[in-house]
Amino acid sequence: MRKISLDRINDLFAAIAAEFRLYLPVDTNGGARYEEWAEGKILSDELNTVRSAKDFFFPQTENLMDFKTEGKKIEIVDTRSETEDFVIFGVKACDVRSFDVLDRVFLAEPQDSFYKNRREHSLILSMACAKPHETCFCTTFGIDPSAPMGDIVCYKTEDALYMDAKTEKGAALLKKIESITVEDNGEAAEKQKKVIRERLEKLPLHNLTADRFGGDKTAEFFKAPEWKELSASCLGCGTCTFVCPTCQCYDIKDFNTGHGIKRFRCWDSCMYSEFTKMSAGQPRLTQLERFRQRFMHKLVYFPANNDGMFACVGCGRCLSKCPIQMNIVKVMKTLGKGEEKNV
Amino acid sequence: MQAVTREILINKAAELLGNGTVDRVFGWKKGEFSYDVTPALFTTREAMDADFVFGDFCGANFSKYLVAETRKEGKVLVFLKPCDTYSFNQLLTEHRFDREKVYVVGIPCSGMLDTVKIKAVAEGIASVEDNGDRVTVHSLFDGDVTVSRNDMLPDRCKNCKSKKHVAYDELIGEDGEVIDSGRFDEVEKLEKMTPDERFAFWQNELSRCIRCNACRDVCPACTCEKCVFDNPDSGVENKAAANSFEEKMFHIIRAFHVAGRCTDCGECSRVCPQHIPLHLLNRKFIKDINEFYGDYQAGAEVGSRAPLVNYTADDPEPAEAVERSHHDA
Amino acid sequence: MFELNDPLIPVIGEVTDIRIDTPDIKTFRVVTPDGKKAFAHRPGQCAMLSMPGVGEAMFSITSSPTNTEYMEFSIKKCGCVTEWLHSMEVGQQITIRGPYGKPFPVDDEFVGKNLLFIAGGVGLAPLRSVINYCRHYRDRYGKIDIVYGSRSKDDLLDYNEIISEWANDAGVNVHLTIDREQEGWDGHVGFVPNYVKELGFDTDKIAVLCGPPIMIKFTLNGLYELGFDKTQIYTTLELRMKCGIGKCGRCNVGSKYVCKDGPVFRFDQLDELPDEY
Amino acid sequence: MSMKNIENNNETYRPLIVAFCCNWCSYAGADLAGNNRLAYPADVKIIRVPCSCRVNPTFILRAFQRGADGVIICGCHPGDCHYTSGNYYTRRRMSLMFSMLDYLGIERERTRVEWVSAAEGAKFAATMNDFCETVAKLGKNKRLEDLRCKQ
């Protein structure tokens, strides 16, 4: 494990940025967000960013290809180029797990080359959550916020940053910054881990369990009467899906620039009324069906297709951002509770 | 602290349910924490005793829900704060629901707390206690922090335009007055900036937009069955926050579409996950309308003619108007 | 790494023939610009066709896999993409990617069985590929019955092919019907579900259904009445799709994606899925 | 739309101007300007609309998105609207819209409303000359541009 004192953290960022593009959470008047590091940018103290780290691999919008048309002829222009290696600093345990969830979708055959390109060129420096929030429930999904995954795990204490390489890529980076860091016996990190684990016990959602959910529960929950009440005041906006680190539904659209066509991919939300609308009909007519789809997908359909892995990482973003304060925790706690279930 | 208590509201609702005045009650349901209150329907006293809450985090404007609620059978009871009643009237003016199917109980409001501001006070909120002019935040790890209640109010409550109910069937507590709390101060501050500064300000704010549509979907003035931004034939349909143009386009057009109809309830800014001060766009229109065409408050009375569907022969010319919006300040 | 072709990047297709089948259905023949078939497919599979700037949409490939020269798509005009496709002229280029979805089990479950194809309207499009495949490998399958109905004689898809080819095949019985009496029509008149019941098929066969939801619903009941079991009946589903590869997240019915796990489903499989299609 | 005429080929910068002209007055005014051989820059692209109030604020933004450097709306003089009151609504809408654009920091000189009657060919030409000059001084529209539309 390597250590650098916090008053020299700028040197660390500068050293990493000399080799790679470096992104880290910084404060804005709309909460923390990832920005590219430059001299003067200060690491945010917020627990997590408002938007998740999925943007790095699955951006809100990206160009897929261009078309040039002339008369009856079409030419496809491949606009892809290989990404340079980049470092994301300060990713929390929940968001690191979300990459695994996204991998299951985008790296399943046939692989998505746009995603794969960025994923393969990334280096993830994760950060333990010294002070989890009341909205956190990552432990429900077996995530340990005191020991996140990633290429390098970081622990930030009052005065120093400790870094432990978990992969070869991570070790290579630590090697490169060896001159500005010192060896550490890991005691401070262990101590922080212990504090974090004690704090987890105090969280109101610490005992939340997803045991009742899983790939084989479609029949049990699909017709649950609780959906009606749960979805009753849903506005049908896309906030929950857009701040969610695992939501990956997308739309493909064309934009006519006046001198060619750009085909782009952008985030889409199953909460939107036109998400499944076809000229021939609409299978999800009301907000109840759209709302149900989102949570069934996270808690039942996704595990069914992915060896039981839930498509929720307990980051709590939807808990704090939903305009009407309806969220996956309330869904999990309410579903199956009612006596008249499966009517 | 709110002037009415949960018990008073439950008793009133139970009474109206009991005597058959209403069939259901639109109210607030408690959540996991002290602040995550969800709008919900109740039909029995038992359900209300179990889950109904009222307090500092009941800021959601219920008026828009009435469009869907009144399409159902029976009559619904809705509790409206003074600012909600303006939206209520505006929706009635636009014939968006049947007045006969709603029973309005007006309730006083002393300003709702801003969750974002509360969360900035302490990390890991265990609970929030309101002691009148002070608010104590109990943190999971940092002990208690006590702050001034006024500092925890969102902009929309700090700049409250009215404590007076403009629509109700019944009122609980005392009715207030229309007040002047300087709601255009922020707009004026922006107007006094140079164009470059204004551009930088809005560029910074609007570039955070993620096009989640929460502002639109919560807005009581946005009740179109199909929004122009969802219509593939409109030429402006665009889900993606593709580049800085799209967000500007969306927010300018949305603000324009509600201009003259926006009651300044501030829901757009409350729900924005990126904390964009969207109400400053709407307030600019309100301020301009007041200055160019005389004072107008959308929703103050049912049936008033909105300024954009009205005119006089001596309205200012656009160039003159833009000039005036700066120097009248 | 970009030797790896992305599944979302299509190839160019050229329309070499446009056949007007009915007032609102046209059949388009598509090849690559150098005159070859864009890719091989299996019966029942689909492809994404698009006109840049207009949009992309999923269509079933109506030509048989045994046709190695070109692909055909029978497309009904009903939305903005299809409207544009209908306005095309021969020689127009479009983009095409695929094939998508699981095919009909023509090389396992269907082998050695009697087959009953039931289609309504444009629902014949996906079945035409299977029917022609089975006709091509005629000796692998038992008796083939085809029940096909439409609103009127003019709305019958592939009418010439049905009359001049299918009806003449040994062991292939074609039963046509139209909804209402029409001058110049001496065939059966009535809705498909009733016609199926009137014809009264034996249950020694596999039935394949495709058509509007209401036709599927009543025909299914009819087949049950005749004694068919859910495991003997197949259909093909249609939902909104964007990617075709199970990633964009909109065409799922329960945990199954129509684009990837379908579009062909057996009714006992559908029964396990939630009722949301 | 050809973008060539706005490119800086070492020549003086030529702005692209979109002019929405009402069918009854301003479009006829433009015609008259042409008949009288009154010159105004070719950079002005006229879009004929049935009435100035047909111009939805979205049109203005779309014009800027697609490369316009200035947008001008021309209609009948107040009181002379072919449809009685269309231009009165235009006046209110555009006052608010332009004020909003100004509030967002977009140069207010890029937008204008002028009333030009069918008899005012000279005014039309003068207005366009003046507007082109004003916009040319501002330079390219950078604040309401859509980078995807740039070549």
Image (cartoon, coloured by chain):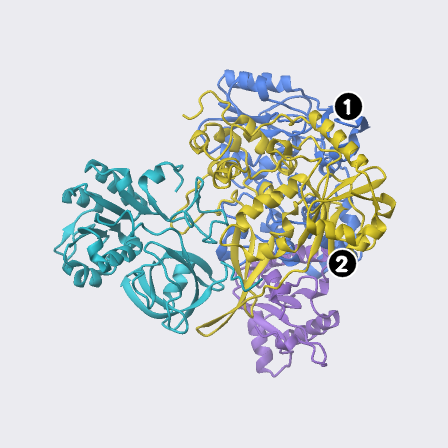
Is any part of residue C189 visible from this angle? Answer: yes
Residue C113: where, in percent of width, then height? Answer: 21, 47
Q: Is residue B270 visible?
A: no
Q: Identify whether B248 is placed above or below B133.
A: below
Residue at x 46%, y 52% (from the top left corner): C245
Q: Which chain is cyan?
A: C
Q: Marks 1 and 2: same chain? A: no
Residue at horizontal 30%, vertical 60%? C64
Chain rendered blue: B
- Provide the residue designation for mark 1: B132
Residue nearest the viewer, comparing C96 with D128: C96
Q: Which chain is yellow?
A: A
* In contact (CB < 8 Å): disc 1 and disc 2: no
Residue at the extreme right of the image, as rendered? A7
Image disc number at residue A19: 2
Chain ID, mark 2: A
Relative to C59, A46 lies left or right: right
- The type of residue carrying mark 2 is Glu
Question: Nearer the viewer's eye, disc 1 or disc 2?
Answer: 2
Q: Residues within 10 Å of mark 1 (few under 14, many from 20)?
A: few
Q: Write down the chain letter for disc 1.
A: B
Relative to B120, B269 lies left or right: left
Above or below, comparing residue B293 to residue C30 in the picture:
above
Which colour represents chain D? purple
